[in-house]
Amino acid sequence: MKWERIEAQWRLFTMQVKARWGLLTDDDLKTLTADKHDLVAKIQRRYGVMREEAEDDIEAWGRELQAEDARQRSGTEQ
């Protein structure tokens, strides 16, 4: 999924962010913006991972969102 779409609908995605990265606190979510680098930094701090690992995880999440969106559009759920 293109990050621009996530940025445009950031409020809708914050709960999915919380579900995916459960170590992020409510305060983290309140201060997070739709800026991808901001999310990378928060994940790095909370999970103690390198920037590249956080970025890869975010990219994987985007692909999962895109696949889920495609399934919903086609009318099938797996």
Image: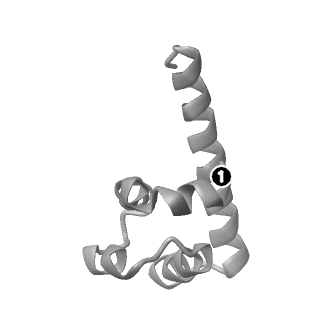
Horizontally, residue 53 falls left or right of residue 36, namely: right
Q: Which residue is at a point 59% across and 16% down the rendered structure image?
A: 74
Left or right of residue 70, residue 43 in this image: left
> Which residue sits at x=52%, y=59%?
8
Question: Which residue lies under the disc numbered 1?
Answer: 60
Q: Please state if 2 lies on the left or on the right of 48 as rendered.
A: right
Instruction: Specify the farthest residue to the left.
Output: 26
Question: Which residue occupies 36% across, 63% down?
Answer: 22
What's the residue type where badge 1 is placed?
Ala
Q: Position of residue 4 (x, y in %)?
A: 63, 60
Q: Is residue 18 left or right of residue 40?
A: left
User: Which type of secondary structure does the marked residue at label 1 adopt?
Assistant: helix
From the top left corner, tell me how far across and down residue 28 is, in percent: 35, 79
The total number of labels drawn is: 1
Color encoding of the figure: one colour
Vertical comparison of 28 with 58: above or below = below
37 lies above or below 17: below
Residue at 62% over, 51% down: 62
Q: Quadrant of residue 49?
A: bottom right
Residue in the foreground of this view, choosing between 19 and 67: 67
Of all residues, the one furthest to the top in this rendering is 75
Q: Nearer the viewer, residue 16 or 73?
A: 73
- Viewer-nearest residue: 70 or 59: 70
Q: Residues within 10 Å of mark 1 (few under 14, many from 20)?
A: few
